[in-house]
Structures are given as structure tokens and as C-alpha cells.
Amino acid sequence: MAGMKRFVTYIYSYEEKKKGGNAGFAKIEIRGAEGRIEIHLRETYPRKAEYSIYFFAEKQGEIVGVPLGEMRLQNGAGDFSAIFKVENLCGTPADFYGMEGIILIGGEPQIFMSRWKEGNPLEVCKEQFRIWDAEKLPEERKEELAEEQKEEPKEEHREAPQERPAAMEQKTPEAEDSENIEISPQELEETEEETIAATEVPMRNIFSRYDWMEIWERLKENHENFMLYREQEICCVKIELKDIRELPRRYWYLGNNSFLLHGFFNYHYLVVGKIGEAQWFIGVPGIYQNQERVMAAIFGFPEFLPEPVENRFGYWYRIIEES
């Protein structure tokens, strides 16, 4: 359907500023000027509690939340759904496309959060959180918001939901994972190449050059190696999440990719591999299933390399460099 966008994002628990395991997921659907969100949490601790739900954006190191609603956890599970306006989000001057994720905060020490747009590192705790209050914005920012609303005609807002996230990606080169907003399962094949191209080109111009063969040899020397056999031999190395920092800086943002984190916490490793003479990829361990295929593609891992085993185990991967 024209004008409709969907994406799914994983939700994680946080306690004492430390990230825990996967606690559920949220589905968000944009239809023109309106959006719908569904949140599903399962097997959480606390078992019984009430949480306030917010869309949030990072502002000068703080997590600034736009109130969305309330959720009650019962027996460690909770479900929530709401419809919201894309512009003037929940009655504020905020815009949905300026939001970076959702956060759930209650009287318990545990916080639940999902962040689909990369940005500055966040310290996830109640002390760093505040509710959006337009009255507390600096005077110059209020003036900017007023000018933006004057300059952007209503017609443009109604027609532009598809294009605005792509523009945001180009403003923040390390925020490539915000392409999640661009892709729905029905549109994956049509939009994937175009979306990636829009973000890859500026990154090549911004980050300094490097010798990928040198990086590859260093990875092989310092990490466990193994071979995958397909039409040709594919050499792989196993890495941990922290080892993403051994890749060129332009790929560090992948350490915050929700699908990659989900796979790492399940299997406790990732892979970097080399196909042919000069094509490198990063892979996430997983089982080939149709639902997992859709999720992998949404989060930027559209291809699958199977291992020769009966349980369909293998690696969801994306090309990260080729000459």
C-alpha cells in the first residue's frame, strides 16, 4: 500500500545502566499522517508492575521522552497498542521521525528500551531521563521550531513520510540503521539497494581510507578461523561484540544493530568472512525461518549462508566491503 511503512524493533531490559537480555519487541506502522504501535513484552522481571511508555530522542546527553501511554505487566508479560500522529507527536511540537526509540519507565529499577536510530551513546537510567517540556526549551530552539512549522507547508508533510527518514540518514552518517524505518516486508526487494546506496556513499567520503586486506589478515591472526563450503570455499573468523571495533570506524554503528545484538546474545559470537578475492561480510548466527528472514532483512542482513547441517543453521549476513 502506497504511503505505508512498517518495521519491527527489539526491546531490551536495563538495570543499573547495564544492558540485559531481550525482553520483547515493538511493531510500528506508519500510514500517511498517522502511526500505530504495538508493544509486546514476555518473561520479564518484575513479574507485576506498571510502566509509562515514551517515544524518546537524545538531547545533550539526556533521554527526552514524549509520553505515549501506560502498560501493566502481569506474570511477566504485557501488551500495549496506540495510534499516534506523525506530526505534533502526542500533542508536542515533536515529530515521529525525530524520535530515536521507545523507553518504558516505572517504579521498578528495570528500564525497557529499544533504539532504532543510532546516535550519541546513552546512559540508560532514570537520572538521565526527563519528559519533553516545550516550556523548558531554550528560547532560540523555540524560535527554530516555530520557523520550521512556518516554512514546511502541510501538503509537504502529508506527502513526505516515505522520504524523510532517508534524509535523516544522510545527516547522521553513523546512523545507517535508521534505514529500518524505510523498509517494510513487502518492499524489501524494491528498496534495499537504493537505501543502502544513499548511506554508503557519504560514509566513503567522510571516513579515512584503510587497507581491508591488512585488517582481514589481522582478524585471521587474532581470532578463530573456520571454513564454509558452498559453490566456493568461504573463510570466516569468529568475533565477539567488542571486536567490531577492530573493523574500520565506519562499521562501528553495527554494534548497536538490534538484530545483530539479538543473534550475539543467543549464540555469543558473530562472524566476519571473505567471499572470493575481495568481498567481505559480517554475519549473525541463526536458523533459517521465514519470520527470521523478514526480521534479518529489515535490520540490514538480507542474505543467508547455511552450514551443512539438518537444522538449517547458518549466518544472516551483509556485505561490508568489496573492491
Image (cartoon, grey):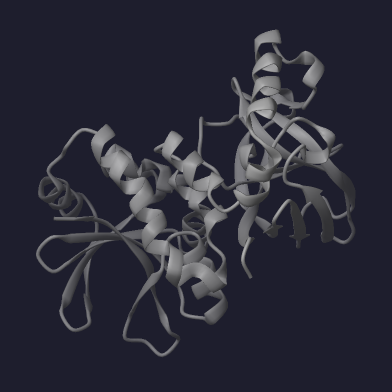
Query: x and y percent of residue 159 in the render?
Result: 63, 51
Q: Nearer the viewer, residue 54 or 242?
A: 54
Q: Is residue 81 visible?
A: yes
Q: Nearer the viewer, residue 296 or 45?
A: 296
Question: Measuring 54% from the left and 43% from the top, which residue is drawn there?
Answer: 117
Question: Measuring 16% from the left and 76% from the top, which residue is drawn there?
Answer: 233
Q: How many marks?
A: 0
Quadrant holding the C terminus: bottom left
Question: Measuring 33% from the left and 80% from the top, which residue is drawn there?
Answer: 307
Quadrant holding the N terminus: bottom right
Examine the rendered structure and indicate whether residue 285 appears above or below residue 262.
Answer: below
* Residue at the top extreme of this rendering: 139
261 sits left or right of 91 in the view? left
Query: x and y percent of residue 29 in the render?
Result: 69, 60
Question: Measuring 46% from the left and 57% from the top, which residue is drawn there?
Answer: 260
Examine the rendered structure and indicate whether residue 186 appears above or below residue 273.
Answer: below
168 sits left or right of 252 in the view? right
Q: Nearer the viewer, residue 241 or 157?
A: 157
* Residue at the bottom extreme of this rendering: 310
Query: x and y percent of residue 115 in the render?
Result: 60, 45
Q: Nearer the viewer, residue 68 or 46?
A: 68
Query: x and y percent of residue 74 in the render?
Result: 90, 59
Examine the rendered structure and indicate whether residue 319 appears above or below residue 214.
Answer: below
Q: Quadrant of residue 31?
A: bottom right
Q: Is residue 16 visible?
A: no
